Amino acid sequence: MKIAITSTGNTMDSMIDARFGRCAWFLIYDTETKLHNVLKNPAAEAEEGAGPAAVKFVAAQGVQKIVSGEFGVKIRPLLEELGVEMIANKESEKRVSEIIEMFNN
């Protein structure tokens, strides 16, 4: 299963980004292979429509779950329609590596 985690930086030690559509990076983690890929969010600097553009971007990566601090009201129906599970993590002091540990246990 592939999981996208919104991240403030491009390493496993980066903090989770509270924003979905305008997060700086997406860390894509594969729970089967234990491999990850870090991708810059192409929608982060968009003047408008960042959320829907970010949905298309992560959906193209084949993710089944997304972990972020929050999801906007326009985003929820788009992800639900694609069958992508949203996991809101309100702990802003969590590192990406800590989120991955939760899925590995």
Image (cartoon, rainbow, N blue to C red):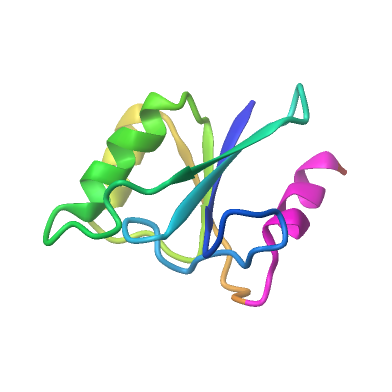
Answer left or right for 29 relative to 59.
Answer: right
Tell me: residue 68, above or below residue 37.
Answer: below
Classify the position of the N terminus by image quarter.
top right
Answer left or right for 29 relative to 44.
Answer: right
Classify the position of the C terminus by image quarter.
top right
**Residue 65 lies in quadrant:** top right
Indicate the position of residue 76 as horizontal and vertical percent values: 32, 49
Residue at image x 39%, y 57%? Answer: 20
Indicate the position of residue 74 as horizontal and vertical percent values: 22, 54
**Residue 28 lies in quadrant:** top right
Indicate the position of residue 22 as horizontal and vertical percent values: 33, 61
Residue at image x 50%, y 65%? Answer: 17
Residues in magenta, as a range: 93-104
Residue at image x 15%, y 53%? Answer: 49
Indicate the position of residue 23 as horizontal and vertical percent values: 40, 60
Tell me: residue 17, above or below residue 80.
Answer: below
Residue at image x 47%, y 69%? Answer: 18
Q: How many marks?
A: 0
Q: Nearer the viewer, residue 42 or 32?
A: 42
Magenta span contains residue 50: no
Report the predominant secondary structure element of the magenta stretch: helix
Tell me: residue 56, above or below residue 73.
Answer: above
Residue at the left extreme?
Answer: 48
Magenta span contains residue 94: yes
